[in-house]
């Protein structure tokens, strides 16, 4: 009973399965790790956006950033831009704000929000405190040609082709990290008398036994739901979206600019993402089937594609339907769910792969592990990730509840406090009198820090009622604004164009 785990089976490939297998193998090379995936189950592969944490994850796995960029059609992501979320069609052309990955200059050291509120004019908060906005607007890369792999001049994450990413991870994990890859269809789950999973019975290989089973089987949740029956905790009454229409859009010319951020454009009954890769754009319409028909969503997507220069022969988008929510338990007995099997809310702010990274890292930290201690580990894991999922929902809801759009019931319902999570109902009145602060959140390693809340709050037009600053406080904050402007000028002068750096890296890797 006290012997540490020796064998791990990961059910399901794709980005989630191979990230988990790769991290476990890299951090714990003595483990015997087998990944089983069926060639009868298609990989959804919609997610193409990450957080800056992915740089550290790839480094830990041992993947070369240059090879990753060359093989997975990678571009750099420096944050997200939100168009039309505050006022929509009735608003002026300035209905745009950024959530950059760079922290505000002077974050934690100066009264930036109060100084911004007292600054003449209507300059956006993010533009005043972060040089990233101007870098993105100029279409520049976040690093220079000579910057080392995973190094940054401006903080960045990635956009990539999810299918190619899974292939790269699979090749790396099997050839360099010793992960065994089994392509077979699981026909049955074989239980032990105590309720643990003993093995997965496959069609061609027979029983595949292990000490720990990781469910990365996607929306089917074959183990955590199919075997253990753990239901979803539905969030449909908080975040209404439950369908997406993704489509791959070719560029009209090979040297077209590549966006340096994810663009999220609101429409009357949802929003549309636009992600620039070197070879194409990934575009998709997210909507609530309770507020819009699929025909309405398709028409909104088509109008956006026409307005953004998509060619007339753009493929017809498919429809992906899902139930927004997360599992009431992620870890039961000797089975833990990671990825879509653990839940999914929506693509906004690209939290899906980040939660995969966090889950895999937590699993690595809890190893080596004996079966005798697994129940305690599972209880702590469930508490931790129930908290993390709830905070993701808080942050995503913030994007909607502050909107002044009045062109549909969709936006009006989002503003109704009855649809707000309890924490936001408590915090919004507090934030009317002071900015979000670190002590508003329960953990040091929050999924979204208070700086992210500030970017969204003030980007959406939220104006707190703050006390006037002293002369010293004002000068300190103004010095931070001046430093952000100096950094922006320096970056604009020294950084290459986004596409030009990607072309250089492609040639350097060939």
Image: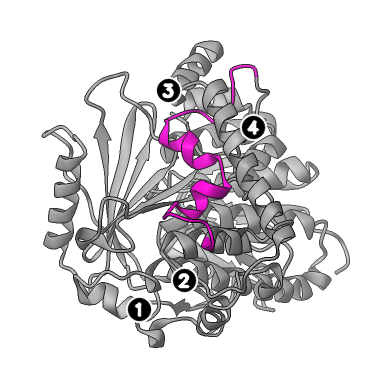
Percent x, y for residue 371?
Answer: 79, 68
Residue position for label 3: 499
Name the disc covering residue 226, or none. 2
Residues drawn in magenta? 117-146
Percent x, y for residue 145?
Answer: 59, 17
- Report the Cα–Cα distance between label 4 and label 3: 17 Å
- Report the Cα–Cα distance between label 1 and label 4: 38 Å
Name the disc covering residue 395, or none. none
Q: Is residue 236 left or right of residue 223?
A: left
- Of discs 1 and 2, which sits in the foreground? 1
Q: Main secondary structure of the magenta part?
A: loop
Q: Secondary structure at mark 1?
A: helix
- Report the Cα–Cα distance between label 2 and label 4: 43 Å
Placement of 390 over or under 475, stated as above or below: below
Q: Residues within 10 Å of mark 3 (few under 14, many from 20)?
A: many
Residue position for label 1: 415
Name which quarter of the figure residue 376 lies in: bottom right
Q: Residues within 10 Å of mark 4 (few under 14, many from 20)?
A: some
Residue 128 painted magenta: yes
């Amino acid at each position: 009973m006290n012997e540490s785990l020796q064998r791990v089976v990961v059910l399901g490939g794709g980005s989630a399965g191979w990230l988990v297998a790769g991290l476990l193998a890299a951090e714990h090379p003595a483990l015997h790790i087998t990944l089983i995936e069926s060639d009868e189950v298609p990989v959804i592969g919609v997610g193409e956006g990450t957080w800056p944490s992915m740089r550290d994850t790839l480094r830990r796995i041992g993947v070369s950033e240059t090879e990753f960029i060359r093989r997975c059609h990678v571009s750099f992501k420096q944050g997200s831009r939100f168009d039309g979320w505050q006022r929509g069609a009735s608003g002026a052309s300035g209905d745009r704000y950024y959530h950059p990955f760079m922290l505000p200059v002077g974050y934690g050291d100066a009264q930036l929000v109060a100084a911004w509120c007292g600054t003449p004019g209507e300059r956006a908060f993010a533009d005043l405190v972060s040089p990233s906005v101007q870098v993105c607007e100029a279409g520049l890369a976040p690093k220079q040609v000579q910057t080392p792999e995973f190094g940054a001049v401006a903080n960045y994450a990635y956009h990539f082709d999810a299918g190619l990413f899974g292939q790269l991870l699979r090749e790396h994990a099997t050839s360099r990290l010793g992960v065994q890859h089994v392509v077979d269809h699981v026909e049955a789950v074989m239980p032990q008398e105590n309720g643990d999973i003993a093995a997965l019975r496959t069609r061609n290989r027979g029983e595949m036994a292990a000490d720990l089973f990781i469910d990365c089987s996607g929306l089917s949740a074959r183990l955590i739901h199919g075997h253990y029956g753990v239901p979803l905790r539905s969030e449909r009454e908080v975040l209404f979206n439950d369908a997406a229409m993704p489509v791959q859009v070719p560029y009209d010319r090979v040297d077209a600019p590549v966006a340096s951020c994810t663009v999220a454009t609101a429409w009357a009954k949802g929003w549309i993402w636009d992600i620039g890769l070197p070879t194409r754009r990934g575009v998709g319409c997210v909507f609530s089937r309770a507020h819009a028909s699929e025909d309405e969503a398709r028409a909104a997507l088509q109008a956006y594609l026409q307005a953004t220069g998509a060619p007339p022969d753009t493929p017809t988008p498919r429809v992906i339907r899902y139930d927004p929510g997360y599992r009431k338990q992620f870890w039961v007995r000797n089975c833990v769910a990671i990825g879509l099997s653990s839940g999914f809310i929506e693509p906004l702010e690209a939290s899906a792969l980040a939660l995969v990274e966090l889950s895999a890292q937590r699993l690595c930290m809890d190893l080596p592990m004996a079966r005798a201690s697994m129940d305690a580990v599972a209880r702590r894991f469930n508490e931790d990730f129930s908290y993390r999922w709830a905070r993701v929902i808080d942050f995503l809801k913030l994007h909607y509840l502050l909107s002044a759009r009045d062109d549909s019931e969709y936006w009006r319902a989002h503003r109704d406090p009855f649809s707000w999570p309890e924490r936001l109902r408590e915090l919004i009145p507090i934030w009317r009198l002071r900015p979000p602060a670190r002590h508003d959140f329960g953990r040091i390693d929050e999924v979204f820090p208070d700086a992210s809340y500030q970017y969204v709050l003030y980007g959406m037009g939220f104006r707190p009622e703050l006390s006037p600053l002293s002369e010293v406080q004002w000068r300190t904050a103004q010095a931070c604004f001046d430093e952000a402007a100096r950094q922006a000028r320096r970056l604009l002068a020294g950084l290459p164009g986004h596409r030009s750096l990607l072309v250089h890296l492609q040639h350097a890797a060939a």
